[in-house]
Amino acid sequence: MHGRRNLCAFVHSCIRAFSLTCIAGLSVAVLAQTADRARTEALAARAAQRIQALQREADQLASQERTLLGDLRKLEIDRQIKSEEFHQADTQLKQVQAQVSGAAARIAELERQDLAERPDLRARVVEIYKLGQARYLRLLLATTDLRRLGEASRAVATLAKLDRERVLSHQRTLDALKESRTSLEARRTTLESVRTAASRAQAAAERAAVARNDLIRDIDRRRDLNAQFSGELLAAQQKLQVALRDVAGAGGAAPAASEPVTLPIKAFRGDLDWPAAGAVRRRFSGRTAASGAAASNGIEIAAEEGTPAQAVHEGVVAFADAFAGFGNLVILDHGGQTFSLYGNLLDVAVAKGARVDRGQRIGSVGATPAGPAGLYFELRVDGQAVDPLQWLKKR
């Protein structure tokens, strides 16, 4: 009887222990399921927020493009007007240049005639000057026929008058031509200024049109990337919804293990959190400077030693150990040949192969090789180092 009582007690204790073990296992499964669900919901919410941001950006880009297209149309009309103004100014300038050339040729011809006729005119003027008032007396003494004297006097006077009129007419014509040439030269100068201004305005309109076209092409490129990122996020969001349904449908049992869903980091360009608080001490160069300074594939953030270093995006720890030149180094794999590197860490809080959430502490800031504390941060997209400042949030 006593033995049966002991056996019952033993069995009871075994059942109780088994029950406690099952409950503990179930509790762990439930906790894990709850954590997975919370993580999945957080990722879904973040994806939804980013999709909304991308949609707002797409609307802004579309509005900017419409404005630029309107500006471009106005610039095209303005360019056509400036082109017509230039054409008219150029045509008028050619006409005035032809008139100036004609006036110059006419002046040169009159001056040649003047030079050719000047000796004969000078001789007659000198002869008349020599005769002066005494010519009448000499004519009177030289002839006895008063009628012939009068005829000779009238002939000399008529000849002198004709010479004077010819000289005056020649001079008036020459003065008029010179005045016309001066006027034409002034008009030509004005037209040259108009033509130059029209040419500059036309070139400015063309440059403005080219600049607007470049902006439109850039907006089109950004809209294409925006659509691509939105599509990738929507695909990730759909996977997250499936994961949420799996978690909800699993009930009390642990869901079957599946590949964790990650959000594409490219969709968060310009929206990534900073890996540590602090000012940028050294910027990205990506190549050796002309002065011979070493290239910097990342940035260095000045921060006090012990400042938390955080993951900028969820991923898997690909490396977590000491590395020559970088001190303690953590490398996170974000998928799609995209990695983030955190160097000069005082300590490492994650292990290789572990999954890390955005904002999770991966270590703390330590000393740099140069001495002062700071975090080295590098971002590689498609295997190539990029400027992290173009990917982190503006501040």
Image (spheres, grey):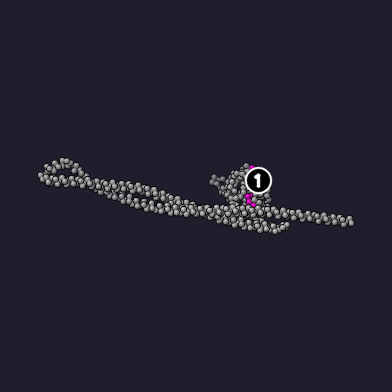
Residue at position x 19%, y 45% in the image: 160
Q: Is residue 252 visible?
A: yes
Which one is nearer the viewer's eye here, 30 or 120? 30
- Give yes or no for residue 308 being in the magenta stretch: yes
In the drawing, does residue 209 fall left or right of residue 348?
Answer: left
Residue at position x 61%, y 57% in the image: 234
- Give yes or no for residue 285 being in the magenta stretch: no
Residue 242: give x, y in percent of width and height.
66, 58
Q: Is residue 210 visible?
A: no
**Residue ranking furthest to the left:** 144
**Residue ranking furthest to the right:** 1
Residue 190: give x, y in percent of width and height.
37, 48
Q: Which residue is mark 1?
A: 308
Residue 224: give x, y in percent of width and height.
55, 56
In the drawing, does residue 212 fall left or right of residue 144?
Answer: right
Residue at position x 87%, y 56% in the image: 5
Residue 249: give x, y in percent of width and height.
70, 59
Which one is nearer the viewer's eye here, 310 or 205? 205
In the drawing, does residue 260 fall left or right of residue 8?
Answer: left
**Magenta highlight range:** 304-318
Amino acid at pointer 1: Pro
